[in-house]
Image (cartoon, rainbow, N blue to C red):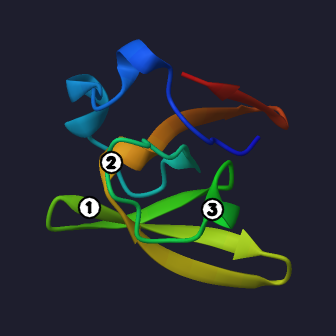
Amino acid sequence: SMLKHKKQKQKGKFSFTRFFQKFQPGDSVAVVQELSQPFAYSNRLQGRTGKVIEKRGSAYYVEIKDINKTKKYLIRPIHLKRIENAGGKIKCQ
């Protein structure tokens, strides 16, 4: 679903745990926009899933399949959520 705004009490706040989370190449991740932080890409990336390719600075290159083409995006960890692929079912952590 498309994120529009935060609740009044949550405005301007973000999770340090999500900000400093670490990923390994090959990890499956979902793009979950943190609205209090700048996000370099359009909203259509929200909710998409992909695989981490490499770390670049403090951000990660994520490969996301867009219909029949794979695209690479450089995304900061605060906008990513680790997911587990368990037999075709996706679980968010």
Disc 2 and disc 3 in contact, CB within 8 angstroms: no
Tell me where residue 84 appears, x and y as whole percent: 62, 32
Cα gap from disc 3 to disc 1, whole angstroms: 19 Å
Q: Which residue is mark 1?
A: 59
Which of the two residues, 5 or 59, is positioned nearer the viewer here? 5
Q: Nearer the viewer, mark 3 or mark 1?
A: 3
What label does residue 22 carry, if any?
Answer: none
Who comes first in sequence, dot 2 or dot 3? 3
What label does residue 43 carry, if any?
Answer: 3
- Does residue 71 sit above or below 75 in this rendering? below
Q: Which residue is mark 2?
A: 77
Does residue 21 appear anywhere in the picture? no
Which residue is at 26% across, 61% downward?
59
Instruction: Give amino acid for label 1.
Output: Ala
Cα gap from disc 2 to disc 1, whole angstroms: 6 Å
Tell me where residue 2 appears, x and y as whole percent: 71, 45
* Direction from residue 40 to residue 77 in the image, left or right: left
Residue 13 lies in quadrant: top left
Which residue is at 14% across, 67% downward?
57
Quadrant location, the N terminus: top right
